[in-house]
Amino acid sequence: MPPLSPMRAIAYGALPCALPIAAEWAPEMMSCNVVGLPSEDMMQDGYEAQWGPLGRNDLGLMKSLGGNAVRLYHSLGLGGKGSHKGFLDRANKLRINVMPGFHSTEPALCNNFDCFEAWKTAAATGFKQGFQVEDGWHPAVSTVILMNEPDFWENDPLCTDQGAWCRVKAVISALDGVLAAEEEAKISAGLEMPGRALSFAMRTSIDGKVQGPGTFGFQDMIAVVEDPSLVEYVCRTPQEKLKKAFYARWVHGLNTQAPWTFVRDFVTNHYQLYDGFGGFPWFIGEYGANGQTRELIVSDLQSMEEKAMSDQNFLGSAFFQFQTAYSKGGSELNFGLFSIGKRKIGETGEVCDRKSHCRTWPAACQNSEGWLSAHALARVKHVKLTLTRIACPK
């Protein structure tokens, strides 16, 4: 596989359903808020009609746009049906690094924010669904997103005191669970590096040393690995072994919609101030650029590439995102390189998980035009210059 840095990833959650306004543009599509959501685990073989070479070829399009990585959500732990090997094999053939994510939107899966069993089970199931090849992770896997924005967990009703311990205990126990699953599956440490993508919200680290957006979480992990008693957690993996794995394999990550120059300067200054946060590299798990101008987006993308090539601490970023998230509505409709097009090109296979019923869905072509707002459409046209390769047939 190619080096992960400079990372030019695209976040991928292209659900095959539309809002009513989009359904008028694409009448063959089903409405997300009428028939229910399809499975959010996009790596299932049932979605091959979208990402596979004989269907819409989303992975091939990412490659043609210059992408070298794909960032996913809900790939482990949601109970997606069937094998995920086809997606991984396809990415491997295209030499696209895969960054699968653990399903991390349900704090109730964890016992008082102890996620050891839930993440261990999710990883073990994933190994049986194609994530394991011989004694290692599938060679297409470069980085596992252990949790996405766990800092929001402290706002969950289950975190009754809204304490920082909720988010930190969840992540350290999740890491512990994945390491335990690797041990049982006889997985040796390979290309995969556990990481988590934090929000860019303002927080203070669990040990009180770091305050600010994003970087508070960098310090969270260093502090709790050194002293799990900060969150009253007792590691099942011997602590010294967990520390060794952490310092050998961890990467820091954050999601942001803020201008890149601010993020770059803030994080760089904190790396210098706090001794490099353990010497770990960091990446942007979601570059949203919501509301940013064409000129700023172009400048940001160029600057991120340059920094990733010159700064060993920065890996790069994942552009948010491949297709508009119709199911979420609101400001989420401002994102997406592509909208769902007018023409149906086939059907998915049967897709499902423990939260969505098993069924097939219509697969439509992608388009860079349609019902999108003028601002969102301008973003689509300016960020990528080769969109005409995949516009729907007239």
Image (cartoon, grey):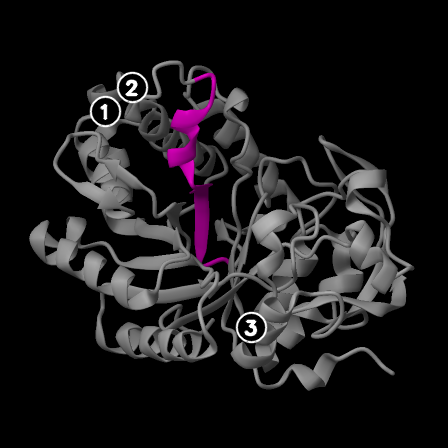
Marks 2 and 1, how far apart at CA: 5 Å
Q: Which residue is mark 1?
A: 228
Q: Residues within 10 Å of mark 3 (few under 14, many from 20)?
A: many
Residue 330 at x, y percent in the picture: 61, 48
Q: Which residue is mark 3?
A: 379
Give the mark nearest the N terminus, 2 or 1. Answer: 1
Of all residues, the one furthest to the front in this rendering is 374
Q: Which residue is mark 2?
A: 233
Residue 98 forms part of the magenta stretch: no
Q: Is residue 239 above or below residue 70?
A: above
Are discs 2 and 1 less than 8 Å apart at CB? yes
Residue 36 at x, y percent in the picture: 80, 38
Q: At label 3, which amino acid type do we have?
A: Arg
Q: At label 1, which amino acid type do we have?
A: Pro
Q: Nearer the viewer, residue 331 or 38?
A: 331
The stretch of residues the image draws in magenta is 141-158
Give the mark nearest the N terminus, 2 or 3. Answer: 2
Residue 369 lies in quadrant: bottom right
Residue 98 at x, y percent in the picture: 52, 60
Q: Is residue 179 above or below residue 24?
A: above
Q: Please tell me which residue is depicted at 34% across the width and 59% down the height of the picture.
A: 283
Residue 22 lies in quadrant: bottom right
Q: Please tell me which residue is depicted at 84% across the width and 46% down the height of the picture.
A: 350
